[in-house]
Image: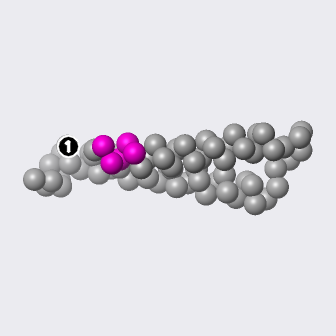
Amino acid sequence: MQTENAIVGLLRARYLESAFRMNQSVDDAVPDKPTIEELRLRRQMYEEARMAFDSLREAIEKGYVDVS
């Protein structure tokens, strides 16, 4: 499942990038709503992809999905 690692890794990198930029751009101030919304969206995308690929891997391992 090489593609899984690439997709999930890319989404995780984007999520962490948003967190890093938020930390860099805030001068002891609370981040604004659009910044938090972007961070939330990127986290959700990463988590959904990770859970989907975990479920797919489990289904393949249990023989529920034939990949031959």
Q: Main secondary structure of the magenta part?
A: helix
Q: Please report the residue visible at 30 percent of the width from the left and 43 percent of the height from the top.
A: 2
Q: Is residue 17 left or right of residue 12?
A: right
Q: Please report the residue visible at 89 percent of the width from the left and 44 percent of the height from the top.
A: 29
The answer to whether residue 51 is visible is no
Q: Is residue 65 left or right of residue 3?
A: left
The answer to whether residue 64 is visible is yes
Locate residue 50, reporting x and y percent. Answer: 43, 47
Residue sitting nearer the eye, 28 or 2: 2
Query: Colour scheme in the image?
Result: one colour
Q: Quadrant of the N terminus?
A: top left
Locate residue 49, reporting x and y percent. Answer: 43, 52
Instruction: Kindly identify the amino acid type of the residue bearing the numbered disc 1.
Output: Glu
Q: Is residue 64 left or right of residue 18?
A: left
Q: Please report the residue visible at 75 percent of the width from the left and 60 percent of the height from the top.
A: 34
Q: Please report the residue visible at 18 percent of the width from the left and 45 percent of the height from the top.
A: 62
**Magenta span:** 2-6
* Callout 1 secondary element: helix
Q: Which residue is mark 1?
A: 61
